[in-house]
Amino acid sequence: MAEILDPKEIMRVDELATSSMWRIATQVTVYVFCLLLGLVSETIAVDDSYIAGYAAAVLRHEFNAVGASLQVQEGVVIVNAESLGTVDRTKVMTALESIPGVVRVEIREGETHTDVREASPIPQEPTKPESKFLPRDLLFAPFHADPRWPHFSGAYRRITSGQEPTKTFAANFGETFALYRNAAPLGGQWEIVIQAGVFSTFNVGTSSKDLQNADYTVGLLTSYRTGPFSGFLRLHHQSSHLGDEFILNSQPPVNRINLSFEELDLKLSYELFAWLRLYGGGGMLVDQDPEDLKQGTSEFGVELTSPWTLWGGKIRPVSYADFQANARSNWRVASSVMAGLQFENARIGDRKLQVLAEYFNGPSPNGQFYTQNTTWFGLGVHLYY
């Protein structure tokens, strides 16, 4: 005969069952939470380890940086400056910042932090740069503020003084390609480079946007780099041509000059720090037209590239200044200053996208207007190696 339980006992059994269920549920929740924490921690560890290994491979294979020491903490790559030796630090920073997951890159003097994940040691076997056709980068960095350095760009300019049109648009097309690279003395490398470009200005104050002037240049360079020091010897041709509509519509009429020359120039550059570069040099015109065109040329400048980025590593402030004094304009100094932002993740191939405000004052760089002083303010978009 079945035993009938007392109602109080039934309630006590229900309470015990409910308590057991809550206790089991709590234990399962805590276990799952701890498991998730472990997985998250492991994921973070894998991410930093992945970055460290990737960065070590980049230093080893792209820069031949044997013995390079780096550490990674929460996406921040810290490289020991001394371990890089003579490697170009600016290019190292740019290469490492392109690694997925990297927040920023720091190149530090002396000891780095020890409470971070370290990359596996890079093999110490001796290596030498191998000869290579069509290497993807350049040993010599561009002169960013030089109005006649071949690259792709477009800029609107407001001319505030001088005889050129008040509103102009400058469209530049050009590139610098390394053809061959090999090892060189003093632990350096040398390469043969071809350079070509078209520098055109349009009068956007007219309904037909008349072409004002176009300068064409092509040249052959041999460049050298060892660590922060680099330089090039260049022979290049430049010829200048006025636009037909500009000639027809100019009042008073413009007398066209058939300006062309070859220039042999030597330029040297030194990176005092990863963020500061100085350069300078001179040259001589040969086979110039008109024949009485004075021959001497000179150029020097300074470039600052911020070691810090903004917006989570997406943009980097930059500023450049270039100064040129040439005999053909009686050694008056032409000053070109540019400043703005470099977009770290917006690239076309190896080219960096920059948006730069610009200021120019001095003898015009535009063809036959070299005898006339001009001043402009502008804003442009540029693509550089």
Image (tube, rainbow, N blue to C red):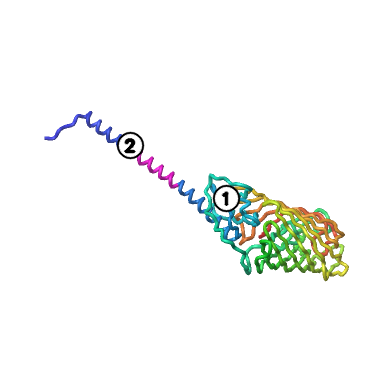
Q: Eyeballing the image, is 155 above or below 181?
A: above
Between 106 and 259, which is closer to the camera in this rendering? Answer: 106
Residue 282, magenta (yes or no): no
Quadrant including the N terminus: top left
Rendering quarter of residue 262: bottom right
Residue 33, magenta (yes or no): yes
Residue at mark 2:
23
Residue 195 % position (x, y): 71, 67
Give the farthest residue toward the bottom: 287
Between 25 and 48, which is closer to the camera in this rendering? Answer: 48
Question: Can you see residue 372?
Answer: yes
Residue 112 % position (x, y): 59, 47
For the point 65% across and 65% down, the residue is: 183
The amino acid on which the numbered mark 2 sits, given as a three-letter code, is Arg
Mark carried by residue 234: none
| Within-10-Å neighbours for mark 2: few <14, some 14–19, many 20+ | few
The amino acid on which the numbered mark 1 sits, given as a three-letter code, is Val
12 left or right of 40?
A: left
Residue at mark 1:
77
308 left or right of 166?
A: left
Residue 374 % position (x, y): 82, 56
111 left or right of 17?
A: right
Residue 289 % position (x, y): 84, 70
What residue span does the magenta drawing correspond to? Answer: 24-39
Task: Give SS at disc 2.
Answer: helix
